[in-house]
Image (cartoon, helix red, strand yellow):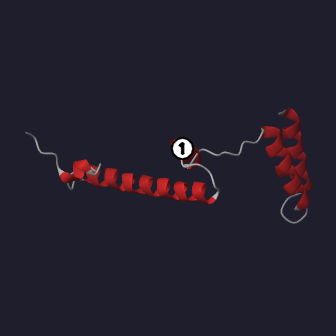
């Protein structure tokens, strides 16, 4: 009968080698992100599901915007900051790009 190492049962790499430490560190950070996603989902009153967690991890979002909406929002913000943060020419270029999309 083969005994499994305790760390194997906990889902961690064994040993003190650098690759084992890096893997365990990555697993710890991923576990923390899942716990944070759980808290966010429960705070919003949503069901705690694997799909919900996947959507909250970096690179995913429940909010989708069309490219033209993003351009329009950006141009409105630029227009409100015209003269202080942006020049008229920059706004003209941004509007021209939006028209070509």
User: Residue drawn 72% across and 42% down?
Assistant: 64
* Residue named by callout 1: 54
Furthest residue to the left?
A: 1
Could you say which quadrant of the image residue 71 lies in?
top right
Task: Say which quadrant the C terminus sits in.
Answer: top right
Furthest residue to the bottom?
A: 84
User: Residue drawn 52% across and 58% down?
Assistant: 36
Instruction: Decide if residue 55 is on the left or right side of residue 88.
Output: left
Instruction: Decide if residue 36 is on the left or right side of residue 14.
Output: right
Q: Is residue 83 above or below residue 58?
A: below
Where residue 31 sits: x, y (%)?
A: 42, 54
Please tell me which residue lies in front, 14 or 92. Answer: 14
Could you say which quadrant of the image residue 54 lies in?
top right
User: Residue drawn 92% across and 54% down?
Assistant: 88
Task: Say which quadrant the N terminus sits in.
Answer: top left
- Disc 1 residue crowd, few under 14, some 14–19, many 20+, Cα 10 Å: some
Instruction: Decide if residue 59 is on the left or right side of residue 27.
Output: right
Where residue 86 sits: x, y (%)?
A: 85, 59
Where residue 75 sits: x, y (%)?
A: 86, 50
């Amino acid at each position: 009968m083969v005994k499994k190492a305790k760390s194997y049962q906990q889902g961690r790499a064994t040993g003190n080698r650098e690759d084992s430490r890096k893997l365990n560190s990555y697993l710890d950070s991923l576990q923390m992100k899942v716990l944070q996603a759980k808290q966010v989902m429960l705070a919003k009153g949503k069901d705690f599901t694997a799909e919900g967690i996947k959507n909250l991890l970096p690179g995913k979002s429940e909010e989708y915007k069309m490219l033209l909406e993003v351009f329009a929002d950006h141009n409105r913000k630029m227009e409100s900051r015209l003269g202080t943060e942006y020049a008229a020419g920059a706004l003209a270029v941004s509007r021209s790009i939006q028209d070509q999309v």
